Amino acid sequence: MNVTTARHIIAGPTAAKPETTVTGAFFASAASAPDAPALWVDGTLYSYSELAGVARHVAAAIRASDHSDAGCAILAYRSLPTYAGILGTLAAGRAYTPLSPRIPVDRNRRILAALAPRTLLVDAPLARLAREILAGYDTPLNVIMMAGNGAPHTDSIAAPHVLSTVRMDDSPPGDTAVADPAMDAAAYVLFTSGSTGLPKGVVIEHGCVARYVDTICRAYAPEPDARMTQLFDPTFDLSVHDMFVTWAAGACLYCVPEKLLFTPIGFANEHALTHWFSTPTTASMLMRYRQLKPDALPGLQVSLFCGEALARQTAEAWRAAAPNSVIDNLYGPTEATIAITAHRVAAAGPAAPADTVAIGQPFNGQSAALLAEDGSFAAPGEIGELIVSGDQLARGYLNAPDQTAAAFIELGTPPVRWYRTGDLARYDDDDGFVYLGRLDNQIKLRGHRIELGEIEAVLRDASGSALVAAIAWPVEGQEVGGITAFVAGTSATAEDLRTACEERLLAAAVPSTIHIRDTLPVNASGKTDRIALRDWCRDNATTG
Amino acid sequence: MTDNTALESARDVLARALGLGPADIPVAGSFDDIAQWDSVSHLQVMLLLEEESGIEINEDTIVQCMTIDGIADVLATK
């Protein structure tokens, strides 16, 4: 990739700014090939004109009851109304925020309270959950039930909320105009876990998404006959890639049924899918199920991984399973729109199998650099906090100016806006940026600064498994008393692993306890759930 | 294995895989309606079935074993 280096800042290639929003790109694809397949969901294939039709109905329903320009929340999951709701909200010129039956009711409620929308779109089968979420929510909402074409819909919603219904039919939607939002209008607000436990809303503008989708479409040039996976939960911003890269290309999105989310190989082959996008955990789960056999996915042309560190052994297993596919490791926080750097996995090289794959170079028009502890740019070769800048950066956190100011800083002369990722990295002339773990995975134990990622690298190597996690535990108040490690899917014993750690780590970094498990918990985003591991340690503290 | 024995065995395997007591497992139920039964604990279910009953883990059995009846059927034909 053609990148330029100046003053320790690595800048991605220059490229003209895109002129079309993702909303415009979807409806342009629908206008140019109305009969082409756009979406497979729940066993049905919908054409672009069918999907555009239901989206226009949703847009009309939003405008009929809500004359503000506030964003809309959408409670739907892996169904036609999920996608019609998102497209309809955008077509009405509003930003969308997904709620989900896969996250706790209380978290849905907190998101709703933080967002304070005027309109909540609900997939009709989730009406009961909507009532549960709305219990005690007193600000009047327009609740729009997105119903199928079957029997009359009879759901009710208690006052002060007002219920209306929109049917998922594709009858001519009349003259519902599709909004042409400005590039600085919000496209979506997604919530990430704050360190305080309160969800933080990240406001992403159309210009950010348009730039990301344009970069991906230039990099992989998907054709209209491409068939892409939709594995990610809509509350996770990687789902934005799934939908809008597919629809900008005029291609077809395949929503993997929930039951097949962890064994999607048969589904991928049955539907001749060409483009794959998942977390590395999805791939390592397939390895654990012994489904990731050589040549298991011969039809894939492009495989992308994002959301957590990609272990080289996972990438190697994927290469064997999908021998006709390029494999790219994408990196980026929600605050920088989906992903902002990428690295192509080279053919098996001399690298040790315990390594994680590099995260590579910044995307078109974006920059990355490393921040030293004193707040200046790190010197070449130094490890630092990865900071990113460019037109993919979020507007900030919703109604949280202090948190926004702490995370989005100005640096350099003239001042440039940077986002502090909280990730540790170093820069390598060959591979670009190399992810070293979370900054807050750096702990202080008995006076030593310890990087939990380093312990995990040793555990991966010694166990032969990618499913490892090291957490600070026990913790008393602010004081870390030790390290507890979890390893799944290994024939190694805890004693073997402890010996490996003792041989290769500072004494203080050797885990006090190593638990061998069959599996590690996974959160709604498909990543190893460290919070659940910490909770487990706390709950089992009395028994050791 | 008779159908009833298979059903009891299915509930027993499921209870142990999910870390629940036998009384917490309904007579009939599925992945969709038991909160503790998720993608991760399902792997546990499959590994137990393989280890104790020699059930082969493949895409068919992974999906079939997402209901208690399905596990019982797989055990009954073993």
Image: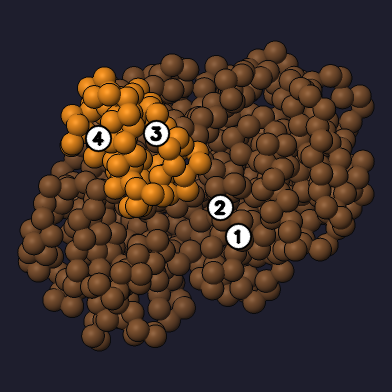
Chain colours: A brown, B orange
Marks 3 and 1 share the same chain: no
Mark 1 lies on a secondary structure that is: helix
Quadrant of residue A110 in the image? bottom right
Q: Position of residue A279 (x, y in %)?
A: 41, 44
Which residue in the structure is indicated by mark 3? B68
Q: Nearer the viewer, mark 3 or mark 1?
A: 3
Mark 4 lies on a secondary structure that is: helix
Name the kind of residue labelled 4 in the image. Answer: Leu
Chain letter for mark 3: B
Which residue in the structure is indicated by mark 1? A107
Name the kind of residue labelled 2 in the image. Answer: Ile
Q: Position of residue A381 (x, y in %)?
A: 30, 65
**Residue A377 drawn above or below residue A282:** below
**Residue A18 drawn above or below residue B19:** above
Mark 1 to mark 2: distance in Å?
Answer: 7 Å
Which residue in the structure is indicated by mark 2? A103
Which residue in the structure is indicated by mark 4? B49
Quarter the C terminus of chain B occupies: top left
Left or right: where A101 falls relative to A537: right
Left or right: where A165 falls relative to A207: right
Q: Are marks 3 and 2 in contact (CB under 8 Å)?
A: no
Mark 3 to mark 1: distance in Å?
Answer: 30 Å
Q: Position of residue A102 (x, y in %)?
A: 55, 47
Quarter the N terminus of chain B occupies: top left
Mark 4 to mark 1: distance in Å?
Answer: 35 Å
Q: Nearer the viewer, mark 3 or mark 2?
A: 3
- Mark found first going from the N terminus, 4 or 3: 4
Q: Give the residue displayed 61% in from the left and 47% down from the top.
A: A100
